[in-house]
Image: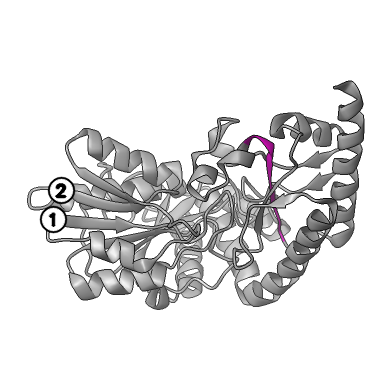
Amino acid sequence: MIYFDNAATTAVCEEAVAAVNKGLQNFGNPSSLHRLGLDAELIVSGARETIADALGADPSEVYFTSGATESSNTAVFGAYKAHSKRKNKVIISSVEHPATANAALALEEAGCEVVRIAPREDGRFYAGDFIDAADENTFLVSVMMVNNETGYVLPVSEIFSGIKKKDRTILTHCDCVQGFMKLPVKVKKLGADMISLSGHKIHAPKGVGALYLKKGVHLPSLVYGGGQESGFRSGTESVPLIAGFGAAVEKLSPTVNERYKKVSALRDCLVSKCREKGYTVNSTEDASPYVVSIAIKGLRSEVLLHYLEKKQIYVSSGSACSKGKKSSVLAQFGCAAVSDFTLRISFCSDNTAEEIDTLINEIANAENELAKVR
């Protein structure tokens, strides 16, 4: 099997599996006052410290959630709930993940003004466009770090720095799902008040994520109950999943730069071979190397995807959340003409150049075989 769909989900690493099993064995409720509860709480607090350290944050600023969708929803709706009596404007990029984009749409339907900043004609985002759009009525600016379909890296630090200089009361949120543990993500450099993280994109289990909430930023709770997570996100913590999340971060954190170099070499290899074959590369040269969007004109994405699947090569035709629907993100980046022929190749550091050779050879085989069928 060759797996090139790591932007959708990743294989759970051995360290995370071991940590999950330990969390299952330590079955106490972290809120219980007896020894079993304390053991479970130590697992949760240990994972919290690990993730906070990786972010350059304080452990009290990290709140566990069910995943990045909940984290981003909490950031968007929490900001609205905290500030909607005085302000009603939200600014996002036009290429946000549905977890942010659809939350903003819900606010728009409730009467908020939502400004969606698009790339300019050169296909790039500019910080000044976000900053210029902000005014005294703005309560939230939400911008993803790395686009999940093309790997495009948005100028988040520059955007948030400019926003805060203009009005420090405007909250800033960053979806770092495709950046965390792949690119350096430090809260001070990013300048975000809130950051969404996901476990299953970094070799941890599905069903767990986190929200970084900067100390001093107050959001009302959206989940009421027993007061877990310092009263911010009630509900008994999933000790096994949190343990797995922490273990994955502990493993990956020391090797962010090393793995980036390795994956960059894989990306360069793929791009070179695609250009030799005349395939279109949608991703820019300065995009995250972990996500590469390519197009094979004349071969529809879904047809090619299933052809490769029969060869046990797994790729994506776009965001896993789109489930085959036509991408609006590619159109935003000026790639609408090739969207029907686009594949997303997303790496992890376990992938190899030999796997890329196999992929390119099988795409060439598909061109020949499917052309005969036509």
Label 2 belongs to which residue? 88
**Residue at 54% over, 34% down:** 322
- Expressed as whole percent of the image width and height from the top left, the position of residue 367 reads 86, 36
Left or right: 1 as drawn, with respect to 100: right
Q: Residue 125 is drawn in which quadrant?
A: bottom left
User: Is residue 327 positioned above or below 232 on the image?
Assistant: above
Left or right: 154 as drawn, with respect to 254: left
Q: Quadrant where the C terminus lies?
A: top right
Residue extending furthest toward the left = 86
The type of residue carrying mark 2 is Asn
Q: Are marks 2 and 1 in contact (CB under 8 Å)?
A: yes
The reply to whether residue 155 is visible in this rendering is yes
- Expressed as whole percent of the image width and height from the top left, the position of residue 237 reads 43, 49
Label 1 belongs to which residue? 137
**Residue at 12% over, 52% down:** 87
The type of residue carrying mark 1 is Asn
Closer-to-camera residue (16/313): 313
SS of the residue at dot 1? loop
